[in-house]
Image (cartoon, rainbow, N blue to C red):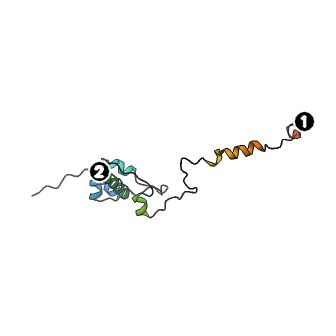
């Protein structure tokens, strides 16, 4: 008779609470995650921005494997694969990106010269201490 493999009760509990399968547990172990880490990262109702543990593990594993395959760490620009899977939109920029050569609007020399050339009018009655 073959003996059943020993199961760590912490991983069994994490599997049940996080709703993950054996493949996800294998990925989490490769990433160096402990069962307590997975349980602590279960999103609550007030944490709508947080991905489910199953998708979180897969996204971390995917990023790690991309980095190992290329020999470098992946550079993440724009939407992550997790957001694409969840169907979430990326925030759009309200202002176009400026190149480093272009000065910011508030530091333009022309603006300051206009302000200095036409100073605001001061009324002496406004500065009096008498009521």
Dot 1, crowdedness within 10 Å: few (<14), some or many (≥20)? few
Question: Relative to the observer, which residue lies in front, 68 or 85?
Answer: 68
CA gap, disc 2 to disc 1?
Answer: 76 Å
Q: Which residue is mark 1?
A: 130
Q: Residue furthest bottom?
A: 87
Confirm whether residue 41 shows in the render.
yes
Q: Nearer the viewer, mark 2 or mark 1?
A: 2
Mark earlier in primary sequence (2, 1): 2
Q: Is residue 10 visible?
A: no
Residue 54 picture location, percent across and down: 35, 58
Q: Which mark is residue 28?
A: none
Residue nearest the observer in this picture, 126 or 103: 103
Quarter containing the N terminus? bottom left
Please tell me which residue is depicted at 27% across the width and 58% down the height of the picture: 23
Toward the left, the furthest residue is 1
Q: Residue at x 55, y 47 (%)?
A: 101
Residue 88 placement (x, y as % from top left): 47, 62
Residue that carries the numbered disc 2 in the rendered image: 68
SS for callout 1: loop
Q: Secondary structure at mark 2?
A: helix
């Amino acid at each position: 008779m073959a003996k059943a493999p020993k199961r760590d009760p912490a991983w069994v509990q994490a599997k049940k609470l996080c709703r993950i399968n054996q493949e996800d547990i294998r990925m989490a172990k490769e990433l160096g995650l402990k069962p307590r880490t997975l349980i602590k990262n279960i999103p609550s109702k007030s944490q709508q921005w947080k991905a489910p543990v199953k998708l979180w593990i897969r996204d971390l594993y995917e990023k790690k494997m991309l980095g190992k395959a290329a020999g470098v760490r992946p550079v993440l620009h724009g939407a992550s694969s997790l957001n694409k899977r969840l169907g979430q939109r990326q925030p759009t920029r309200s202002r176009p990106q400026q190149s480093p050569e272009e000065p910011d609007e508030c530091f333009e020399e022309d603006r300051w010269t206009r302000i200095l050339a036409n100073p605001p009018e001061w009324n002496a009655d406004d500065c009096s201490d008498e009521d």
